[in-house]
């Protein structure tokens, strides 16, 4: 094969790779959308079942930890939201899940909703 033919093949394969990556991103976004719809319906169902029952919100628990036990919320946020995770959020379009070192990070609409640490 000549240099020109190799260069042409390389260009073609790069275009195909870019198209494949775009398909993967689109599929991930579609899956994320369906997962959001399912979660919303699950929450609606749970709310309908529990109408009139008093619960303690996660927000109330966090505020107790922050004020009574002096948990530094900003420090905790910076431990979770590293530059690497911010970059991955951009790649995923703000919604999705991925592994970062010892933890799995899940996000929805550019909000980190879950961090699962792998304690070995």
Image: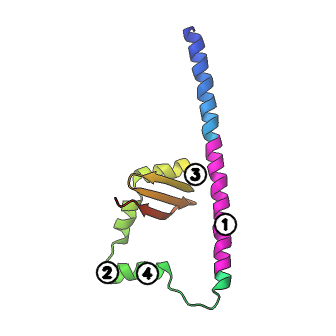
What number is the disc on residue 69? 2
Foreground of the two, 58 or 120: 120
Please identify the quarter of the rendering in which residue 96 is found.
Answer: bottom right
Mark 4, secondary structure of its residue: helix
What whole-number distance in Å separates the C-alpha atoms at marks 1 and 3?
A: 19 Å
What number is the disc on residue 38? 1
- Tell whether position 38 is magenta: yes
Q: Are marks 1 and 4 in contact (CB under 8 Å)?
A: no
What number is the disc on residue 93? 3
Please identify the quarter of the rendering in which residue 54 is found.
Answer: bottom right
What whole-number distance in Å separates the C-alpha atoms at marks 4 and 2?
A: 11 Å
The residue carrying pointer 2 sits among few (fewer than 14), some (14 to 19) or many (20 or more) residues within 10 Å by Cα, namely few
The residue carrying pointer 1 sits among few (fewer than 14), some (14 to 19) or many (20 or more) residues within 10 Å by Cα, namely few
What number is the disc on residue 80? none
To which residue does mark 4 refer? 61
Nearer mark to the viewer, of 1 and 4: 1
Indicate which disc, 1 or 4, sits on the residue closer to the N terminus: 1
- Name the side, left or right, on which 10 lies relative to 82: right
Mark 2, secondary structure of its residue: loop
């Amino acid at each position: 094969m000549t240099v020109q033919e190799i260069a042409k093949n390389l260009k073609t394969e790069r275009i195909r790779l870019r198209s494949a990556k775009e398909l993967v991103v689109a599929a991930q976004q579609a899956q994320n959308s369906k997962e959001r719809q399912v979660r919303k319906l699950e929450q609606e169902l749970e709310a309908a079942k529990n109408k009139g029952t008093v619960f303690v919100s996660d927000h109330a628990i966090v505020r107790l930890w922050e004020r009574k036990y002096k948990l530094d919320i900003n420090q905790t946020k910076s431990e979770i939201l590293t530059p690497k995770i911010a970059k991955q959020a951009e790649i995923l379009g703000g919604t999705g899940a991925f592994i970062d070192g010892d933890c799995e990070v899940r996000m929805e609409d550019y909000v980190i909703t879950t961090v699962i640490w792998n304690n070995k």
